[in-house]
Amino acid sequence: MKQTTKRFISMIAGLAFIIGAFVVYINLIRPLNDETQDVKAQVFGKETLIANQKKNIDKIKALIATYNQAENKEAIASALPIKQDDAGVLAQLKGIIENSGLVVQSLSFSGPGAKISVETNASRTATSTQGLTRALGTVRVQAQLAGTYEGLKKFLGNLESNVRIFDLESLSFAASGDQGSRNVYNFSVTVVTYYQN
């Protein structure tokens, strides 16, 4: 065989080898490479999710630790006492009313109130909600007050910013029967407060 024929055959063989390598790469290696990249992306996504979940769990543990501290328990107990405490309700309401410039004409309690169930987000998604819901007792207070409109606004602001939770259930007012005092009104207010069972 001639030297040129050998060169031509070796060039054809080299070209066939390059084309074969390209075909193998396209049909075998590239799909596996794409599949490997997809698997790596899924693994990275799951690792990121796990890392975020661990951070959230650590934050929740830190929150639980802060709620378990004594001063936080006292603050929560001030807002939502662990027993009915009618005397505390009376003292706080009387202070709020007097601080607002209103005059108490009468106060009446109706309690112990109905028990309402408070459901946490966790209990809605849990299969068993036993132990995750708590019943709250309510105390309803009806008050007949007299004073100015500005005093009523101040009373409502003080009621809203008070440490203990009070909900305004109803409010009605009428002009005072006294003809000499045009800016004085009679207010009928019903508020509800809660306590832990």
Image (cartoon, rainbow, N blue to C red):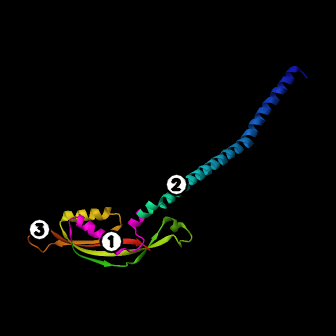
Q: Marks 1 and 3, how far apart in space? A: 32 Å
Specify the amino acid type for callout 2.
Lys
Helix, strand or loop under label 1: helix
Most extreme residue toward the front is 70
Residue 75, percent from left and from top: 41, 62
- Asked whether residue 62 is drawn in magenta, I would say no
Quadrant housing residue 156: bottom left
Q: Which residue is mark 1?
A: 89
Q: Which mark is residue 19?
A: none
Q: Which residue is mark 2?
A: 59
Quadrant housing residue 189: bottom left
Residue 93, percent from left and from top: 29, 69
- Do the CB atoms of the residues marked 1 and 3 lie less than 8 Å apart? no
Specify the amino acid type for callout 3.
Arg
Question: Mark 1: few, some, or many residues within 10 Å (few <14, many ≥20)?
Answer: many
Q: Which mark is residue 182?
A: 3
Specify the amino acid type for callout 1.
Val
Residue depth check, mark 1 versus mark 3: number of the one nearer the observer: 1
Q: Residue at x 23, y 72 (%)?
A: 172
Q: Residue at x 40, y 75 (%)?
A: 137
State which tag comes first along the sequence, 3 or 2. Answer: 2
Q: Marks 3 and 2, how far apart in space? A: 57 Å
Magenta stretch, main secondary structure, is helix
**Bounds of the magenta span?**
75-103
Residue depth check, mark 1 versus mark 2: number of the one nearer the observer: 1
Q: Is residue 4 left or right of residue 127?
A: right
Helix, strand or loop under label 2: helix
- In the displayed structure, 55 sits above or below 173; it is above
Q: Quadrant of the N terminus?
A: top right
